[in-house]
Amino acid sequence: MDDWPSHTEELTRKTSEQLDKWSKAYDAGKITKREFFIVVTTLYDTTSGLIKKDLSDLIADIHAELRAPSKT
């Protein structure tokens, strides 16, 4: 039983999978910027403090980038 992943490791893995899934959907134009923003916000709000810090920081960085005014 010692070789099972910890809750943190498993939640980090699943969060990473979802971030990748929705990032690809956004990049492909399948979801809007607003929809992606809502996904990223939800991922951060539900996992912050429960997943590895590097992934949490990445989600926070993506959130900040999505909140920034468009430069186009």
Image (cartoon, rainbow, N blue to C red):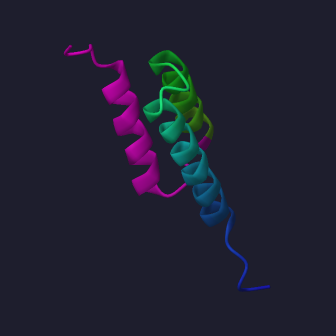
Residue at the image position 52 percent from the left and 47 percent from the top: 20
Q: Position of residue 29 (x, y in %)?
A: 48, 26
Q: Quadrant of residue 53?
A: bottom left
The magenta stretch spans residue 57: yes
Q: Is residue 45 visible?
A: yes
Q: Is residue 70 above or below residue 28?
A: above
Q: Is residue 53 left or right of residue 65?
A: right
- Quarter holding the C terminus is top left
Q: Position of residue 32 (x, y in %)?
A: 50, 19
Residue at the image position 49 percent from the left and 16 percent from the top: 34
| Residue farthest along the bottom direction in this orientation | 2
Q: Position of residue 33 (x, y in %)?
A: 45, 20
The magenta stretch spans residue 61: yes
For the record, the magenta segment spans 47-72
Q: Quadrant of residue 31?
A: top right
Q: Quadrant of residue 5?
A: bottom right
Q: Position of residue 26 (x, y in %)?
A: 48, 31
- Quarter holding the N terminus is bottom right
